[in-house]
Amino acid sequence: MSPLATEPAFQRLLAAAGQAPSVLNTQPWRLKAVRGEFAELLADPDRRLRVSDPRGRSLHVSCGAALFGLRLAVRTAGHRPVIWLLPNTGEEPRLLAALRVSPYGPAPSRTRELYECIGLRRTNREPFADRRIPEHVLADLRQAASREGAGLVVLGRCASAELLEHVAIADDELSENDDYLAELRAWTASGRLRDGLPSSVQGPGCVDDPAPVRDFGTHRGRGPVHFESRPQLAVLTTAGDGPVDWLRAGQALQRVLLTATLHGVSASFLNQPLDLRDMRRRSDPHHRRGHIQMILRLGYGPAVPRAPRRAAVELKETAAA
């Protein structure tokens, strides 16, 4: 039976897609079943960050991550997902991807393992241990990105330190933009129960300079602490810098993060330079290793709570909508 044919089966798909990472945990997606044969992933324009994401890049990356979770749920149900990216933007600009399902047989073991990691993955803004990630794990993460048509460039010590300086400079500039700060505060307020980043998931302040973690300003009374002495950074890249590339980056991001979870590796993000680039409506200059779509901090961190999530029923787009 098709995983789109019944309401309980479709709820399983909604749950898998809905636990994807998203910019400021905005969860800017909707999902619609069509005749029990197709699923459509739509952007939710009400959840787009108008100030920091004027190009819609972060929204597309977020929705691409949700799309990868949807693919895993379909495949582990014994079906094959066939994807079309941006299939009909002329008539429905919200439509980011269409997915058709067909019977295909049992899923490979790695696919099942990644699916089981969906509910375990967390963005971890706590200090990481001063322990290097083994090369075979990094190779697996790079392969995960490559399978989705993206690249994961793991930076060395000097390149990581230089990038942290760029992050700090961008953060200083953004801190002077009142509209940006107002948008940030709206999505990091302590009263948010189903989306956004409440203080419980923001992590502590950092006494190190430059800081390897983003400071959202609310720490629940926790004082600043030292983070790892040598942060391990990586950048996720794509060959192009348009909507299709952003959707591919999102799928690659979720595959990388779930693979990291499988290895016990934690991750958080330092995307302030990318926010600043988007706010200036500039595309990323082309270079040999591709266009940077995400900046990741990787390492071994403690257990942390999950960011709040909307109920699966809230993610469903009805035919009449």
Image (cartoon, rainbow, N blue to C red):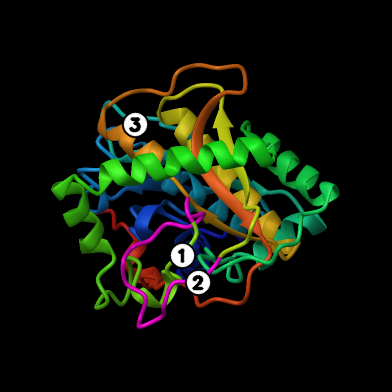
Q: Say whether marks 3 and 2 touch (CB < 8 Å).
A: no
- Give me the disc on residue 225: 2
Q: Split into 4 quadrants, where in the image is the N terminus?
A: bottom right
Q: Which residue is mark 3?
A: 277
Identity of the residue drawn at 76% across and 55% down: 132
Q: Characterize the local packing of mark 1: few (<14), some (14-19) or many (20 or more) Cα atoms within 10 angstroms.
A: some
* Residue 104 placement, left or right of 27: right
Residue type at mark 3 is Arg
Q: Characterize the local packing of mark 3: few (<14), some (14-19) or many (20 or more) Cα atoms within 10 angstroms.
A: some
Q: Split into 4 quadrants, where in the image is the C terminus?
A: bottom left
For the record, the magenta segment spans 209-226
Identity of the residue drawn at 35% across and 29% down: 88
Tag nearer the camera, 1 or 3: 1
Q: Say whether marks 1 and 3 touch (CB < 8 Å).
A: no
Tag nearer the camera, 3 or 2: 2
Q: Position of residue 125 (x, y in %)?
A: 50, 65
Q: Say whether marks 1 and 2 touch (CB < 8 Å).
A: yes
Q: CA distance from mark 1 to mark 3?
A: 25 Å
Q: Position of residue 19 (x, y in %)?
A: 49, 64
Q: Position of residue 70 (x, y in %)?
A: 54, 54
Examine the image and state in which quarter residue 155 appears.
top right
Say which label, 1 or 2, has the lower sequence index. 1
Q: Which residue is mark 1?
A: 206
Examine the image and state in which quarter residue 187 appears.
bottom left
Q: Secondary structure at mark 2?
A: loop
* Residue 91 placement, left or right of 202: left
